[in-house]
Image (cartoon, rainbow, N blue to C red):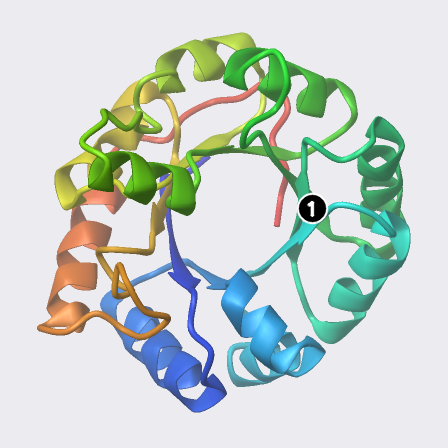
Amino acid sequence: MKPTVQISLDLIDLDEALRTADMAIRAGVDWLEAGTPLIIAEGLRGVRELHARFPAVPIVADLKIMDGGWLEAEMMAKAGASMVVVMGQAHTETVELVVKAGHDFGVKIMGDNMAMPGGPVAGAQLLESLGCDYIVHHIGYDMRNLRRQRGLAAPTPLDDLRAIVDAVSIPVQAVGGLTLEQATSTPEYGAPLVVVGAPLAIDAYAFSSAKGDLEGTLRLICEKVHAYPDIKFEKEAIV
């Protein structure tokens, strides 16, 4: 798989999300993510508008599915999503039904291992066994921020990333407060899906675009990530 850059559009204003997406595509970003805040604010419209504006660009719908899996995945697929996200903490039956919807409607499934019982490595293995096409290794926003505010150490997605990559045979992405250097280093761990969100592209404390030369930052990220060699997987989804 070619190392890939995905921008997380964790915004609540659709016009701002579309402007940011335009900028990201100019900079070389490969995948657009309709982030959870955008889906909460705009619903299916947010996914439809992204797909209409960028019909050739894969769209990730970060719906964080916990129940009603087949129906919710169907809705996102029909709105133009290429991939949908299901939470590993859901019942295994929900993950199975989301995977079934993926087969039924031609979308790929990302399984999110955030706070799964048994830990992130076992969680990733379970999600793969249930048929997910990608693993999202996710350290949560609230946990990271509150721990830091309380003077406690917060984990990063890099802590277990290599162990997860070694434990599964599908592509992995690492999500959760990574610095620019950390985010662009994930292909070195065997994880080719580089996600750019807060605080790199999205304000760390508000659902709005980060200030500064965002397009220039995205271009530098894309240049570095796209320079990595392809990474081979036993099971590789074609988007």
Instruction: Tell me the quarter of the picture where residue 87 sits.
Output: top right
Give the amino acid at mark 1.
Answer: Lys
The residue indicated by pointer 1 is 108
- On the question of residue 37 being in view, the answer is yes
Quadrant position of residue 7: bottom left
Rendered view: 217 above or below 215: above
Count how many numbered circles sit on residues in the image.
1
**Residue 80: percent from left, percent from top:** 69, 71
Is 191 displayed left or right of 220 in the figure?
Answer: right
Q: Residue at x 26, y 59 (%)?
A: 204
> Residue 132 at x, y = what percent?
70, 32
For mark 1, give the secondary structure.
Answer: strand
> In the image, 82: left or right of 91?
left
| Residue 13 at x, y percent in the picture | 45, 85
Which residue does the image show at 39% across and 38% down from the upper left?
143
Image height of 180 relative to 156, above or below: below
